[in-house]
């Protein structure tokens, strides 16, 4: 057969794929441990290292134990963590969210004391703290947006007081970035940044997290505050609002099923971008790997690379430590 076309045989794409060295020279996107932010669940008590069934390899840590885990992550090249708290008690308003001695606040203080260079972020939401599991106080059977703002702002200030570098609101209430910025500034925390979960979709992929954080809504779902998966233009509006309200950094969540949204934001905004490789995305790979259906290392690195390629500057991922080890 003697085919020639407008480009073939002159152009041959395979020329630059012939060896590992050549491929490395023309590789457009690189993953490094620096790209990862490691999510951690902190609980009351001492000496607690509790495996989370739905997130194989992940644990709930008491504050004394999380320090050792972070030390190991730092040694593997990870520079940032995001903390989630499980409180001792819940109520209708989620008041343990802003208690200065709750697990997140104590963990922030201990981690910044032990590792001043560690970038510490905190998730700001109320669903782990409310007895009904919604992301703010209720009015009838829906979340009272403006009442939630007050509590979220107070929570963000308590995280800043503990020493968080960035607070990350994940509640999807309208106006929360502005309310948090104003409260931080009024309390003297001008340097504390806001990483906004600007574009957070109502997603089935949060399932394992809700087991880990005990934050499943006791009735209904989160569709009256989290975004509809179908909406791409609305994502741009959410991001633009958070930018105007003072967000320093924008996040898209989940990541894998929303890579188009991540790319959209990359093209429309100059802010740093993060994406959340959420619990269900992690557990899918872990489950398939446990069955021998996927090569875990290759599948994980390919997935994380897709997020970087789509435009993420930072990937929140439970794979952080393992992936960092695979990359050296
Ligand atoms: C709290 C919160 C959730 C996640 C991060 N912050 C759950 C939710 O909105 O129900 C999900 C993270 C994950 O699935 O890994 N609002
Ligand atoms: Zn929430």
Image: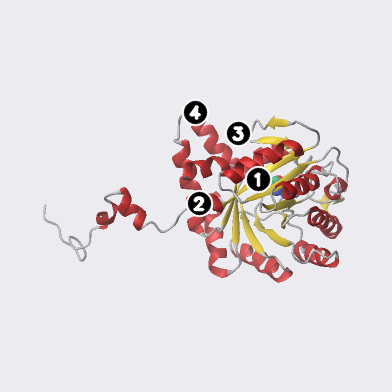
| Residue 177, horizontal then vertical, whole percent | 75, 63
Q: CA distance from mark 4 to mark 3?
A: 15 Å
Secondary structure at numbered mark 2: loop
Secondary structure at numbered mark 1: strand
Residue at 72% from the left image edge and 68% from the top image edge = 246
Asked whether 17 or 264 is in front, the reply is: 17
Q: CA distance from mark 2 to mark 4?
A: 28 Å
Mark in front: 3 vs 2: 2
Q: Is mark 3 within 8 Å of ligand 1?
A: no
Decide: marks 2, 1 in contact (CB < 8 A)?
Answer: no
Q: Could you say which disc has been placed on residue 221 in the image?
A: none
Decide: marks 3, 2 in contact (CB < 8 A)?
Answer: no
| Residue 86, horizontal then vertical, whole percent | 78, 40
**Comes first in the chain, label 3 or label 1:** 1
Q: In the displayed structure, does residue 183 sit left or right of residue 310?
A: right
Decide: marks 3, 1 in contact (CB < 8 A)?
Answer: no
Asked whether 114 or 171 is in front, the reply is: 114
Q: CA distance from mark 4 to mark 1?
A: 25 Å
Q: Which residue is mark 2?
A: 32
Decide: marks 4, 3 in contact (CB < 8 A)?
Answer: no
Q: Could you say which disc has been placed on residue 291 in the image?
A: 4
Q: CA distance from mark 2 to mark 1?
A: 17 Å
Identify the residue at the far bottom of this view: 244
Q: Is mark 1 within 8 Å of ligand 1?
A: yes
Q: Which residue is mark 1?
A: 39
Residue at 29% from the left image edge and 52% from the top image edge = 17
């Amino acid at each position: 057969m003697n085919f020639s076309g407008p480009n073939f045989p002159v152009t041959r794409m395979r020329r630059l794929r012939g060896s590992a060295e050549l491929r490395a020279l023309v590789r457009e996107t690189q993953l490094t441990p620096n790209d990862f932010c490691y999510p951690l669940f902190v609980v009351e008590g001492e000496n607690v290292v509790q495996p989370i069934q739905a997130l194989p390899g992940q644990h709930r840590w008491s504050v004394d134990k999380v320090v050792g885990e972070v030390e190991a992550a730092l040694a593997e090249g990870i520079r940032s963590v995001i903390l989630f708290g499980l409180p001792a008690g819940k109520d209708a308003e989620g008041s343990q969210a802003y208690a200065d001695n709750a697990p997140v606040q104590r963990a922030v203080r201990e981690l910044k004391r032990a590792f001043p260079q560690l970038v510490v972020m905190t998730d700001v939401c109320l669903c782990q703290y409310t007895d009904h599991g919604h992301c703010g106080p209720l009015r009838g059977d829906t979340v009272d947006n403006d009442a939630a703002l007050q509590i979220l702002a107070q929570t963000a200030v308590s995280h800043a007081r503990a020493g968080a570098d960035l607070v990350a609101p994940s509640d999807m209430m309208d106006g929360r970035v502005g309310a948090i910025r104003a409260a931080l500034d009024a309390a003297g925390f001008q340097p504390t940044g806001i990483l906004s979960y600007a574009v957070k979709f109502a997603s089935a992929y949060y399932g394992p997290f809700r087991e880990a954080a005990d934050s499943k809504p006791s009735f209904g779902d989160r569709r009256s505050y989290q975004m509809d998966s179908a909406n791409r233009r609305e994502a741009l509006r959410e991001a633009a609002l958070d930018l105007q309200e003072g967000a320093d950094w924008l996040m898209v969540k989940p990541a894998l099923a929303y890579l188009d949204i991540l790319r959209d934001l990359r093209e429309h905004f100059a802010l740093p971008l993060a994406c959340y490789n959420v619990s269900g995305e992690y557990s899918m790979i872990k489950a398939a790997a446990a069955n021998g259906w996927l090569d875990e290392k290759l599948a994980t690195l390919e997935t994380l690379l897709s997020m970087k390629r789509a435009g993420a500057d930072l990937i929140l991922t439970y794979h952080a430590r393992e992936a960092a080890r695979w990359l050296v």
